[in-house]
Image (spheres, rainbow, N blue to C red):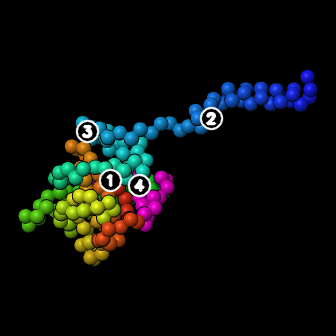
Amino acid sequence: MSFERTTRIRIVAIIAAVGSLLGSPATASAAPARTCVVDPGNATRTVTSLMEHCTAEEILGLFADAPLGVRPLGKKKLSLLPVFQLRGRTLPDDAAKTLTRTQSVLGDALTFTERGGRPWVYKNYVWGTDAGAEVVPAVSRVDGRPVYAADFSADFLGEPVSLHEYRQLTPGVWIARDIGGGSGPTSTPTGGVIALS
């Protein structure tokens, strides 16, 4: 047997041995499966999945595909989801999670009620409620489909820093975009995504 052929056989044998120790490339480097679950019968499971298992793309897709549904009513727990866009670019997971954790300490709920006979929503901050905003039927700034919208400009000296767009994801969960920086349609939004339950 030639030296060249013997060397080739040894290299193939070494590669096969290393491969069997490591497993197939797909299993050796694969991360644990992330399963994004929307459970119409379990609001807690849905929100937990949105917070811990859904990717940014999946969350943005869920908002895009959600029907308008019914307008939220009453006090709803606010969960800031680990997604944030800056001028249309989605921030990396770690940066988005850091940003949403920082924002989470400011408040944990929205209260949907009426003010002067009109649908109204207040942000529940750790120091109390804000000026709030009227909740109106509108079209989404990002996709042109129906939403319930609330413009919190009164909280920011008239500047459109926080504009919410709500859709009902399941009977007990709403998904919303928090978009700032203008009032017209945009293909480059800046802001995050929230779940209400």
Q: Marks 2/1: CA distance?
A: 35 Å
- What range is drawn magenta here? 74-94
Residue 108, compared with residue 26, is above or below; it is below
Whether pointer 4 and pointer 2 mark residues with C-beta atoms closer than 8 Å, the reply is no
Instruction: Identify the residue under disc 3.
Output: 40
Q: Residue 174 appears at what percent x and percent y?
A: 26, 50
Residue 80 lies in magenta, yes or no? yes
Q: Is residue 87 visible?
A: yes
Residue 33, compared with residue 133, is above or below; it is above
Give the crowd class for mark 4: few <14, some 14-19, many >=20 residues within 10 Å. Answer: many
Q: Amino acid at mark 2?
A: Pro
Magenta region, main secondary structure: strand
Q: Marks 4/1: CA distance?
A: 14 Å
Q: Amino acid at mark 3?
A: Pro
Q: Marks 4/2: CA distance?
A: 30 Å
Mark 2 or mark 4, which is nearer the start of the sequence?
2
Which circle marks residue 64 in the picture?
1
The quadrant in which residue 48 appears is top left
